[in-house]
Image (tube, helix red, strand yellow):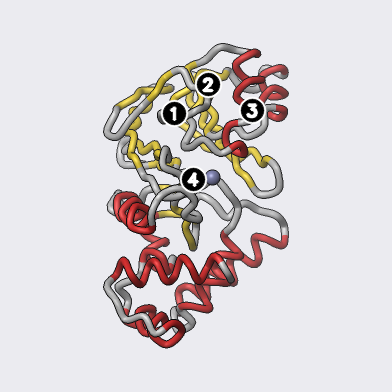
Amino acid sequence: MFSVNPIKAFSDNYIWLLTTNEGSIVVDPGEAVKILDLIDKDKINLQGVLITHHHFDHTSGLGDLINKKLVDVYGPENNIIEINKRVKDLDQISVLGIDFEVIEIPGHTLDHIAFYAFNDNNPILFCGDSLFAGGCGRVFEGTYEQMFNSLKKLSSLPSNTKVYCGHEYTLSNLKFALEVDIQNKYLMDEYKHILELSKSSTPSLPTTIDKEFKVNPFLRCNDPFIKNKIKKEFGIEGNELETFTALRKWKDNF
Ligand SMILES: [Zn+2]
């Protein structure tokens, strides 16, 4: 038995709280205050931390957490000194009795990794700021090709994989997606659904790989309608990577 719940941080970050009968871990603690409160009130037994990339809004709570309880902090090679278990592509780690595989997914940052667990055919993915519901992260440090390949890796995971992203960006992502892929009936229905959720500030996550193939334009760059849209907007008639690159640049200025 396990559960995954969001802890909201800053304006739109999610710190994911994974709990089993062995305890809890948190993913990307940008802030510590709500987690410390749960520890103080004996609501959770913190056993570890997973870090997907070095950005402050995913790591700034680490110092306070470690001061409170020295636990294993798994993360990539970077400048975050609180990470005490460095991991790299294809490493296997076991936390709370769940076996995770590390997947390197550069693009948003060069150090970006994801944590994937098959979990008895109940697969889960913590992917930070790479794949988002209806979109993908900005390319800050890597190349567009790296980001494209990273999304290919993630989207090759089982279609029922539950995807826990680092931010609540779904509504704005789907607005952009509709601009690109207006004839997509499934996307329109999903937009209406997420719009309803947003009215009560209900988290739209997790999403699934299966759903992302239906709504996320960044996973649909081979779709003839989207290719044609990019040709009409920018005069670019290229392969899937070139379509992806044009789409990501368009979103940057949307
Ligand atoms: Zn980030």
* Residue at the spot 33% in from the left edge and 28% down from the top edge: 99
Between marks 2 and 1 in the image, the one whose residue lies nearer the viewer: 2
Q: Amino acid at mark 1?
A: Gly
- Quarter of the figure with the C terminus: bottom right
- Quarter of the figure with the N terminus: top left
Q: Which residue in the protein does label 1 denote?
A: 75
Q: Is residue 215 visible?
A: no
Q: Which residue in the protein does label 4 denote?
A: 164
Say whether disc 4 or disc 3 marks the residue closer to the N-terminus.
Answer: 3
Q: Is residue 67 above or below residue 2?
A: above
Q: Are marks 4 and 2 in contact (CB under 8 Å)?
A: no
Say whether disc 4 or disc 2 marks the residue closer to the N-terminus.
Answer: 2
Q: Is residue 169 above or below residue 221?
A: above
Outermost bottom residue: 232
Between marks 4 and 2 in the image, the one whose residue lies nearer the viewer: 2
Q: Nearer the viewer, residue 95 or 51?
A: 51
Say whether disc 3 or disc 2 marks the residue closer to the N-terminus.
Answer: 3
Q: Is residue 216 above or below residue 85?
A: below
Q: Which residue in the protein does label 2 denote?
A: 81
Q: CA distance from mark 4 to mark 2?
A: 25 Å
Q: Nearer the viewer, residue 14 or 222?
A: 222
Q: Is residue 56 above or below residue 222?
A: above
Q: Amino acid at mark 3?
A: Gly
Categorize mark 4 by other alpha carbons within 10 Å: few (<14), some (14-19), many (20+).
Answer: many
Between marks 4 and 3 in the image, the one whose residue lies nearer the viewer: 3
What kind of element bears circle 1?
A: strand
Image quadrant assignment for residue 87: top left
What kind of element bears circle 2?
A: loop
